[in-house]
Image (cartoon, grey):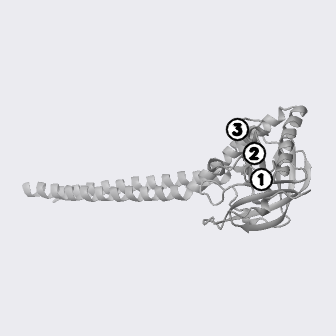
Amino acid sequence: MKARKKAEKKSNKVTKKKKLSSNITTIILILIFLVGLSVMLYPTVSNFVNQRNQSKAIATYDEKVSQMKPEDYTKYFEAAEKYNEELAAHPSAFFNPDEIKDYEKILDITGTGIMGYITIKKLGVELPIYHGTDEGILQIAAGHLKGTSFPIGGESTHSVVSAHRGLPSAKLFTDLDKMEVGDTFTITILNREITYEVDDISIILPNETDSLQIEDKKEYCTLMTCTPYGINTHRLLVRGHCVGTGEPQHIHVTTEAFQIDPTITASVIGIVILILLLVRVLIRTRKRGNREILNRYKKNRNK
């Protein structure tokens, strides 16, 4: 009798150790899976969040524009035109932009630093354009290079709009190298939408700025980002000339900022299904372990 109890005790200890080992292995596998899944989904989810914030900022901007009166548009455009004229008359301001005062106040109708937004249909990109190219701005949106013309159109102007590429958290200008001569992009400022057609694509060193200067009677806008991808020793320039000015074709509404990308929906559904499958496997494993313990117990009692 004592020998049987001893054997049962020993058998239970071995079974418990096996069960514990099996559970630990399962937990480790689940954790590895979840970590891997998080790493894999991070770019998609973070880009979605960033795009939603961009859309919300643009929608808020458009809403503000829709509430303005014609005389308000005139006032803001006159200030921007005056800035551009001073810039054209003083080329040195490209290198010393503080020579011309009140840059941050011009075209800032929301008080957030947004002057408008850029749309590149070919790349599926629409980004708010902020004053300046500080790192904080370039991480989430496009920035207007201080010392270049405001992108409102007009002769003897050359605007430069910059954004990062290759960020895991946001698409931004990642696909700018896919642009070709003849492609178009638009910039919307207040109630004015300016269409540019790409006429030149070049790669320069950061200290080579001749191609960013204003040219007499020309109306340019250059999109700028770092290149090569991941190395960033040079700058990719995609220049366009104005081919048309009109009213915006599409006015954003705030609700558009909360539309969920189908890719995100599919990913979330996939994650839920995988977690449910893992839970099911874990439950089945535990049930199987419990059955084995019960069977061993019955065998020992029958001996």
Label 2 Cα neighbours within 10 Å, binned few <14 / some 14-19 / many ≥20: some
Write down the quadrant of residue 80 in the picture.
top right
Residue 121 image position (x, y, % from top left): 79, 56
**Mark 2 lies on residue:** 99
Write down the quadrant of residue 24 in the picture.
bottom left
- Please, what is the three-letter code of the amino acid marked with disc 1? Ser
At x 60% / y 66%, what residue is drawn? 231
95 left or right of 191 in image: left
Disc nearer the start of the sequence (1/3):
1
Secondary structure of the residue carrying tag 3 is: loop
Q: Nearer the viewer, residue 9 or 65?
A: 65
Disc 3 to disc 2, how far (Cα)?
23 Å
At x 70% / y 58%, what residue is drawn? 173
Residue 144 image position (x, y, % from top left): 74, 50
**Mark 1 lies on residue:** 92
User: Residue 286 got which mark?
Assistant: none
**Mark 3 lies on residue:** 112
- Please, what is the three-letter code of the amino acid marked with disc 2? Glu
Q: Tell me if I can see residue 72 in this picture.
A: yes
At x 89% / y 36%, what residue is drawn? 74
At x 38% / y 55%, what residue is drawn? 27
Q: Nearer the viewer, mark 3 or mark 2?
A: 2
